[in-house]
Amino acid sequence: MSKEMVEALDALESEKGIKKEYVIESLEAALVAAYKRNYNQAQNVNVEFDTKKGNIHVYAVKEVVEDVVDDRLEVSLEDAQKKSRGYEVGDHVQEEVTPKDFGRIAAQTAKQVIMQRVREAERDIIYNEYSQYEHEIIQGTVERSDNRYVYINFGKIEAVMSKNDQMPGETYNSRDRIRVYVTKVENATKGPQVFVSRTDPGLVKRLFEQQVPEIYDGTVEIVSIAREAGDRTKIAVKSDNPDVDPVGTCVGPKGARVQAVVDELNGENIDVVPYVDDPVDFIANALNPAEVIAVQFDENDKKQCIVIVPDYHLSLAIGKKGQNARLAAKLTGYKIDIKPESQVEFVDDNDQDVDINDVESGKIDIEKTRENAANADDAQNPAANDSEDVDDEDDSTDSEE
């Protein structure tokens, strides 16, 4: 070994960012193993690397004892004090045992260690670089594809996109430029691995952030997203600023902003709905464009509800193959059962049947519906209000007639 090794370590640190101390520490540990392996030695040894001259020294470490049993591991107090009178029993003494031909072994070991550390450092650098793109959009070039993945080149690394992450109807040809959403970055044993997607709802969120400055700066918040990639997406938005219309802001002038997102997703339909704290109104908004008459929540499961819609809006509320109802359920977090008004009977506070037509139209829960039904009955029968002072006997008489 020589000063050339020191210079090589300095160059490695400046060019690759690999700390010289880290390589030397690894090198010394490797040389200890190499010494024991090549010279059939079992005793404790230390290897020291001279960072100025590049020389390597091997030292046997022995314990100071009164009576020596194994001279490979122990040294007598008398012999130890010949080197230094400060040694006492229990101390450890180092004796240089560097073999004459150890330089050749050291050089081979150093080469292996350095190459290994370079590979590890390069993997760490790439991982650190691309891990910051996790949950972000990044653009790459399609390299190739097989039965499992589409491989996308990002320059320093090749990402993979599985079948489930590929948009239905999209084709990915070699050399195509493509924008994808980074779902995960792993530092695997074979090197960093980047997983990307075109179907993840996060892609829609990031696209809206790019198109709508109000979302990026927090004026408008995306509360939830429900997506069936390649077909339809529902996105719920809100704003704490009363002067800002969150839906209009996301749609943009003449629909320009939402259209830019639709174009990026190759024509995928996007519904932007307003989020409200009232779950009844939120569920009704999520089922847009269908009209909602009432929402009834299950007493045993507050996350399950029945939604009443006009008969002529039943298919619209359910959607093609149940898509509208399915996306609304994902968007709101409620299990939604949709029923037409003709199949539902409401009951007032006196357990009397109330015709659905007596319920005020509006996005209300079942309790409000009952109240509105009672009010509607009163409004349609003013004579009943005029006879409030009539005693029960008169009421029964009128009833018999």
Image (tube, helix red, strand yellow):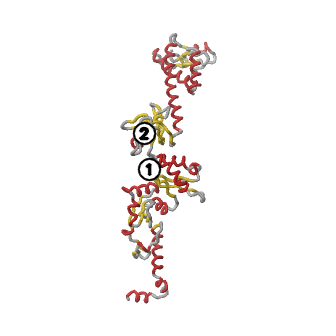
Q: Hey, which quadrant is residue 150 in on the image?
A: top left
Task: Please tell me whether mark 1 sits on a helix, a strand or a loop.
Answer: loop
Q: Nearer the viewer, mark 1 or mark 2?
A: 1
Residue of label 2: 161
In the picture, measured across the screen, residue 43 lies left or right of residue 213, that is left
Task: Please tell me whether mark 2 sits on a helix, a strand or a loop.
Answer: strand
- Residues at discs 1 and 2 in contact (Cβ within 8 Å): no
Question: In the rendered view of the protein, which quadrant contains the C terminus?
Answer: bottom left
Q: Three-letter amino acid code at disc 1?
A: Glu
Residue of label 1: 268
Q: Farthest front residue?
A: 254
Residue at 51% across, 34% down: 127
Q: Which percent across, then down, holds residue 230?
A: 42, 48
Using the image, tell me which numbered label, if any, was put on residue 208: none
Q: Is residue 273 above or below residue 117?
A: below
Q: Is residue 15 above or below residue 85?
A: below
Q: Which percent across, then down, holds residue 67?
A: 53, 16
Q: Which percent across, then down, holds residue 97?
A: 53, 13
Residue at 45% across, 42% down: 197
Residue at 45% across, 60% down: 289
Q: Hey, which quadrant is residue 311 in on the image?
A: bottom left
